[in-house]
Image: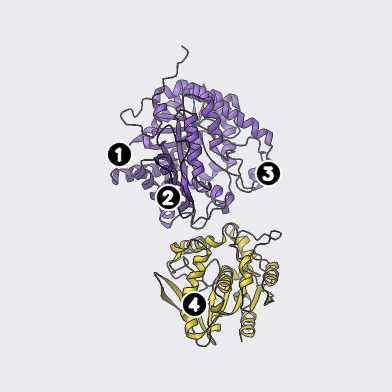
Amino acid sequence: MKLHWFAEASYPDLPRDFRESGESSWVTTPISRCDPRVVGDMTRMFIRLMQQADREGFDGLAMNEHHQTPFALTPSPNLLASVLANTTSRAAILIIGDSLALYNPPIRVAEEVAWLDCLSNGRVISGFVFGTPMDTLYCYGVSPVELRERFHEARELIQRAWTAEEPFAFNGKYTKLRYVNLWPRPVQKSPPIWVPGQGSVETWDLALQNDYCYGQLSFSGLHSAKPLVDAWWEHADKTGYDTNPFQLAFTQLICCAETDAEAEAKYSEAVKYFYRNRYVHPGFETGPGYRTQKSVEAMGRFSAQTNEKLPPEEKARANRGEMDFWDYDRHGFIIAGSPERVRQRLEDMVKELRVGQLIGCLHMGNLDEETASMNTHLVATRVQPHLANLWTGYEDRWTPEAVRNAKPVQRAA
Amino acid sequence: MMEALVQPRIHALGDTSLRVYQGGTGAPLVYLHGFEQHPGAAGFLNRLAETREVHAPEHPGFGQSGGFAGLTDILDLILHYRAFLTPIVEQHGPVDLVGHSLGGMFAAEVAAVCPDLVRRLVLVNAYGLWLDDHPMPDPFVIPKVELDAAKWADPAAAAAEPNSFDGDPKHYVFYRSQNLGSASKFMWPIPDRGLARRLKYLRAPTLILHGAEDGLVPPIYAEAWAAAIADSEVEILPGAGHLPMLEAEDAFIAALQRFLG
C-alpha cells in the first residue's frame, strides 16, 4: 500500500468563537480574520513537514486547490508543488488536484504539470478535479450548468497536449487555440491521473474507462465512506473492470503518539478546530444544476445507509467540533493512539475498503509543528513499514515509475 | 369557477419542443416568464387572454421545454425566440412582448436584435443590467427566508405562488433545481450578458413596470432601464415586490391595457 502525506493548509488563528459568529468559512469569510504574516509562517511550516515526510519515506506529498477560505490556504497547488519538486527527491508530487474548469485557457495546467514533472524528475501525479461548489461556482463564478462540460473539454485538451507529436488546433466550445504545442513535455509521457468523486456513477465510469485512480476524499471516515466505497467496487466489478486496490485513494486523519493518552492530549483541540471551522454558508454548498437528479438520488440512498452506523445528529455534532475525541476515532473520522493501535486500525480500515493509496492527513486544524512532526516520524517509522507490503500482488499504475523504483529509505539502526 | 382560458400545449420548434400556455383571442401578446419558474395558467394570464391571444412559452430547459443543450450564449436564446415569434408575426404582424424578471432580459434582447418582430415592449422587474453602485442580491444563494423577504412586498404571499409544476410533489425540488440551473446560464454569476450595449437598437416603445418593493431587482434599476431606452416610460407599482402580476394584479393588468391599448 502507498502512503501519502497530506494536510489541509488550515489557517491556525481563528478565534475560539469563530463558529458561533455564524460567518461562513468559505467564499465570504471576512479578510479581517487573516494576518498575511501568519500565512507565511504556516506555509513554511507545511513545506518543512512535507520535506520531512519525503526524507522519512512517505510515498507521496499531496496538495490541493481551494479558494477564499481559511480551511485551506492553497489557492494554487502547483505553487506548493513547485517548492517541493525542487527540495525533495523521492516522494511523488501528488497534486490532487487542479480544478480544470477554472484555468483559462486550461493549457496552463498541461504546461505547469509538465514543467513540474521535469523539475521533479518524473514524480508528478496529476489530479483533475471538478472543485467544490464554493471554489468553482462562487469564488470563480463558473455557471453550475457549464462546470462539467468545461472540465471535460479541458481534460481532453490537457491529455492530448501532453502526448501530441505535432502542433494541433483545438476548437473547443470554451477554449479555442490555433497552435497547441506544449513546451516542455512531461518526463512521464502522460503522468498518472487521479480524480476525486463523491459517489456519482458518472465519475466512477470516468475513472474506470480512462484508467484514472478514483479518490474518495472526505474527512468523515470509515462509517460515512463504507457504503460509497463498497458501491464503487461493486460498480467496477459489474462493469468488467479489475478491482485493483491501487485504483482507490482515501483520505484519513491520523493522530499518532507514543501512547493513547498522549494522542488525546496532543491532538484533541486540533481535531475539534478542524471540524468546527468547516462551517459553510448553506447557500454556497451547492448550486442549481450542479448535481444531476441521478446523482442527488444516489447520494440520498448512500446517506440513508450511512445513517445506520452514524446517525445524522452524531455527524452534525462531529462537524460542530463537539464530539468526544475517542468518538471521532470510533466512527473513523480520525485514527488515533499509539503506533501499534494506529497500525492495527489503519490495516483494518484499508482492508475493509480495499484502499491502495492512503492519503494520511498528518496535520489538522491548528496543530503545532512539533506534534505534526512527531506524527510524521511515528507513522513513517512504526506504522508504514507494516503496511507497505499490503496489496503487493496488484500492479500500481497510478504512482509514477520514479517513485515506485525509488530506493528504500535508509533508517538509522 | 370559470374554466382557464390559457392551456398548456407542447409546441414543436425546429429540432426541439417547448411547452406554451396559450389561449384567448385578439391581437397576440407574448409573455416571457421569470427566472424561477413559469407561472402556469395563472390568474393574470387568464385575464390578459380575455382580450388578447396569449402565448406564454416556457424557456428552454425550464419545466417541460427542451432546447437547453443547444444554447451556448445569449445569441442562441435570441434565435430560439425569433424562431418562435416568426410564424405569429407572419400571421398577425409584430407582437406585444411582455417579459418579467429573466424573461425581461430575454424580451429586451429579442426586441433589440429583431426589431421587426416587436410592436410594443413591456419590461417587468427585469434583469439584464448591472449597476456597480447598486449590486443586486445573489438570488441563487440567499436562504429561503431572505429570498422571500426580498421577493415579496408581503412574504406571506409566497405560499400561494402559482407555477407550472404538475408532477409528484416529491420531485418539485428537481423541477426547481432544473429551472434555476437553466436560469444560471444567463444570470451566473452576474445577470449581465451585454444587453446595455444593444439597447440603442431598440425601436419598440417600451413600458418599464416595476414593483416598488422589489429587493431582488431594486427599483433603481427601473431608472437605469429608462435612462438606457430612449422611447420609454416608467410605472412603479406600489404594494408589490418582484412579482407585481401577482401582488398587484389589478394595477398590473390596467398598466398593460393602458400601454398596449
- Type of amino acid at the residue the image marks with label 2: Ala
Q: Are marks 2 and 4 on the same chain?
A: no
Residue A242: which disc?
1
Label 1 secondary element: loop
Chain letter of disc 4 in the image: B
Type of amino acid at the residue the image marks with label 1? Asp
Q: Colour of chain B?
A: yellow
Q: CA distance from mark 3 to mark 1?
A: 48 Å
Mark 3 on the same chain as mark 1: yes
Q: Residue at x 43, y 26 (%)?
A: A343
Magenta span: helix, strand or loop, mainly?
loop
Q: Which residues are magenta?
A: B160-167
CA separation in Å, label 4 and label 1 = 55 Å
Apparent colour of chain A = purple
Badge 1 or badge 2: first in the primary sequence: 1
Q: Give the residue pinned by disc 3.
A: A31
Residues at discs 4 and 1 in contact (Cβ within 8 Å) = no
What amino acid is at disc 3?
Ile
Q: Please name the residue that numbered disc 2 is placed on.
A: A304
Give the CA distance from mark 3 to mark 2: 38 Å
Q: Is residue B58 visible?
A: no
Mark 4 lies on residue:
B85
Amino acid type of the residue tagged 4 in the rendering: Leu
